Image (spheres, rainbow, N blue to C red):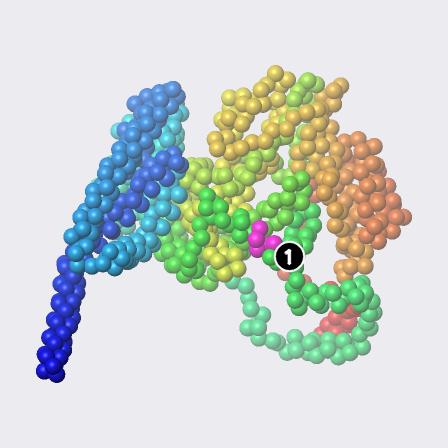
Amino acid sequence: ENQTNSQQNTQNNNSSVESSTNLSINKNVANAEFYRVNNQIRNIYKNKIWTNFTVSMFNRHLEKGTTPSALFFDKFPRPFLSRDKDFVKEYNEIIEKAQKEIMNLCIKYLSNRIDTMDTDLKNIHEKLRPYFEKDELDSKFDEIESREEYHLRPKMKKSMEKVNRIYAKKFEVLETVNNSDSNISNVSQNNFERSTNGSNRSTNFAGFNRSNVKFTNRYNDYRKRNDKFFSSRSSSKNRFYNSSTNSSLSNLSFNQRNIGRFSRGSSKDRTTNVNTNHRQRFSNSNQNCDSLDCFFKETRHKIDIKNIPLQKETIDFKFELYKNLMNLDYDLNFNINRDQFEALKKYIKYKPFKVIECDKNIGVGLISQENYVKLANDHLENREFYFKLENDPLNEVTQCINSTLRELCFRKDISKSLLKKLLIDKGQLGNFRILAKLHKEKFGIRPIISYKNSIISNLCLLIDLLLQPWVKKLNSFIKDSQNLIQDLNNNRFPVDSKIFSCDFESLYTNMGLVLALKIVTEFMQDKLESEHITIRGFNEILKIVLFNNYFKFFDYFFKQIKGIAMGTKCGPALANIFVNFFEEKFLLLHKPLYYKRYIDDIFIITKCDFDISILSNFFDTLKLNIVGGEEVNFLDLLIKIDKITGKIIFRLFIKPTNSFNYLFIDSNHPNFIFKNIPKGVLIRVRRTCSYFSDYLYYSSKFIEQLEKKGFKYSNLRKICSGIGDANQQELITYKLRNKENFNKSLIMKFPFSKNLTNLKEIIKKSYVNCS
């Protein structure tokens, strides 16, 4: 029996060893089989994920009404009848229909591919099922899919962001140009358009120079006048325009063949005369030299007073002043009580809330830190206007801007002295903040991006100084409400005329960047004459300003991708020129009785039978709000027409939310400030009001508010009476300020304090004693 039991145990052990051996063999076989098809599974999943994503991108394009770059409008033939409005409209509709059909066809065939890939994966799964348990095999497939999706995620994110930034640019009706306005042949025009369109495609600015033939002709005229200069730069000896060089100056670039078409004479003459022609081309500079002189003056390095060596006289004066300060009298009067002082110390230490400015100069507002951050984040989450960045872009953007500026200098589009001023050595990104809109019934915020000391601050200053002289010459430009009163003071209009006040809704954020670049460049085309910058240099610098609106909010980084940021130095000038481009067409066709504009506010007087709704149709994508009536509000004025004389009557407009935030009389400011506050306020009222009765009414309101700030009523009435006797016509004209020459004066600056009563006399005494 013992022998039988031992034999059975031996047989059982052998069977268990055999089963374990078979199991290990099966595992090895299964792993080998899976390894054999692993690459195939990965490729199928990779293709499937990307194909799915491509379908989602096509659906996104169909949802937005846009297309991939291969289906842009500029990829189709240009309209044959490009000046026929109905033809161009129907032609665009046909192209849109074709674009949608092509994208739907792509979606259909891509969906079929996805089904085929699902079938392949299913077949592979069935082949591997005998070697694995079902849950184990499913987990392996899921792991491969998730890994491939993880690797493709950054690429898909970047592609989808690019899709969201694309917008549809249709063919536009070309304006009719007289033959006398054009001095070049149609062949040259076609070559120009071909060259500029090629550069547009390389920088994704589709259709930049296609919407206006006049711009094309004017620029060709400009080049023809300076053909020697341009042809010499295209010579084989000049490395700036080598045929292998791909110019980044997209919107105004020319290839070598087109430049050669304007050449005259031998290559030797062109090469030897390049320097003299270059000087002649820029010799007739007028207004822009003044602007650039201001730029060089404002961007010069400030002198560090610590590096100035002290002379013996300065040291003697310093010690004499210290000696006399020991006898200084102090009048210790505080304008806040102890509780206010302790509350101020607590606020400075803990910052439990935030003090922010309110829009329209209403004053300041108090808001908790949590609500401030929440309001700002809710606004920045709008992906139509802002794009959130993962890392700090400062170094990368700085290098990119500097390399572009050096390239412009290399191509002689900006001078070396201007390059030195524009190169970024130290800088920061813009800072985002919000203003509270308390002047409206519904609470809102106004986003502001401060670019002071930022990487593009000097570029913005340059663009602003170049544009400002020409902005002031626009037919519709007014400086302020005082300028409007001057302009309308002696005018008479029909008594049945209509007056309207209009304003654009979110003008800055609704300005198309590509369109703004084109309009401003065209505007400056025949105005920019400087030895420091050419029109192409201006175009590239403006492009940097418009397309590099980077800023930060706390530790997060953003880029504004639509519109111009409020807070940009050159923003008002760009907005003025942008709106002027559209309003010129309206003024040319309809010719109202009177039309003036202050950035985004329009004042217009028309005949009684004019339909004002026509005005809105001229401003493309901008939304215009129009208000009319017998009396309208424009800026800080209420304006109406006298029904007897036809004269314009003005009176002051005070907003319901005006909080009259004037200084308290015991505030720590010099005495002349408190003398000038009531005087300045009442002069403004007298200048604005056409009727003396209105002046008495509004002046009493301001006197009441100034009394609450501690001003004496008797002094206020005396000032009011004196200003009331003044001639209104003298107050309407601008006061010319005589700039005193301080070259021979010794200027000393000290922080003001009411407690230092006789500081001025001590300084004079110390100076006399040591001299």
Element type at marker 1?
A: strand
Q: Nearer the viewer, residue 601 or 483?
A: 601
Q: Could you tell me the amino acid type at mark 1?
A: Ser
How would you classify the magenta stretch by its main secondary structure? helix
- Horizontally, residue 86 falls left or right of residue 143, namely right
Q: Nearer the viewer, residue 303 or 395?
A: 395
Q: Quadrant of residue 502?
A: top right
Q: Quadrant of residue 730?
A: top right
Name the residue at the right extreme.
Answer: 714
Q: Is residue 207 above or below residue 708?
A: above
Residue 272 seen: no
Magenta residues (range): 371-375
Percent x, y of residue 242: 24, 48
- Residue found 76% across the figure and 31% down from its top: 690
Q: Residues within 10 Å of mark 1 (few under 14, many from 20)?
A: few
Q: Is residue 341 above or below residue 521?
A: below
Q: Is residue 623 above or below residue 318?
A: above
Q: Is residue 204 above or below residue 425?
A: above
Identify the residue under disc 1: 368
Percent x, y of residue 758: 80, 68
Could you tell me which quadrant the N terminus lies in? bottom left
Q: Is residue 309 magenta?
A: no
Residue 141 seen: yes
Percent x, y of residue 206: 34, 38
